Amino acid sequence: MVTLPFPDPHDAARVDDDRWEAFEALVREQHAALCAYAYRYVRSRAAAEEVVQDVLFRVWRRRNHMTQVELVPYVYRSVAHAAISRIRTERAIHARNLQLRQQGAAHEPSDASAVT
């Protein structure tokens, strides 16, 4: 089980070093598997790597709030949620672009009726 060490207010530098080592171990051990897991959702290697990178960055940034958390299951859940969110956003953007194109085509005059 990988956890971030519980903060000790008397030795903050050592705790941060310990957290970095635990986080680095998580990344080293799980990065490829996390990318493969994200790929199952987003179907793009670049998008999967981006999802994993974003999640790992957020985990590191929130490290002071994550005491005694089982990190691996938490990161996998976070990757799944982030990938699903990305898919929803991409679908919404695609639908909006399609709608705008259709509206634009409906308002354009046809070549036969164009006045020269």
Image: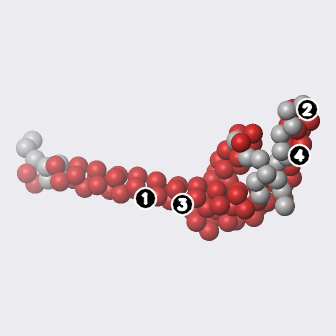
Residue 29 falls in image quadrant: bottom right
Q: Residues within 10 Å of mark 3 (few under 14, many from 20)?
A: some
**Which residue is the site of mark 3?**
84
Residue 43 can be seen, yes or no: no
Residue 81 image point, x, y percent: 58, 58
- Taking 55 as reference, is 14 above or below it? above
Percent position (x, y) of residue 70?
Answer: 77, 58
Cβ atoms under marks 1 and 4 closer than 8 Å: no
Task: Give the CA distance from mark 2 to mark 4.
Answer: 16 Å
Q: Residues within 10 Å of mark 2 (few under 14, many from 20)?
A: few
- Residue type, label 4: Glu
Q: Earlier in the sequence, mark 3 or mark 1?
A: 3
Q: Amino acid at mark 2?
A: Asp
Q: Earlier in the sequence, mark 2 or mark 3?
A: 2
Residue at the disc numbered 1: 91
Q: CA distance from mark 3 to mark 1?
A: 11 Å
- Badge 2 or badge 4: first in the primary sequence: 2
Which residue is at a point 67% across and 66% down the rendered structure image? 37
Mark seen at residue 21: 4
Three-letter residue code for mark 3: Ile
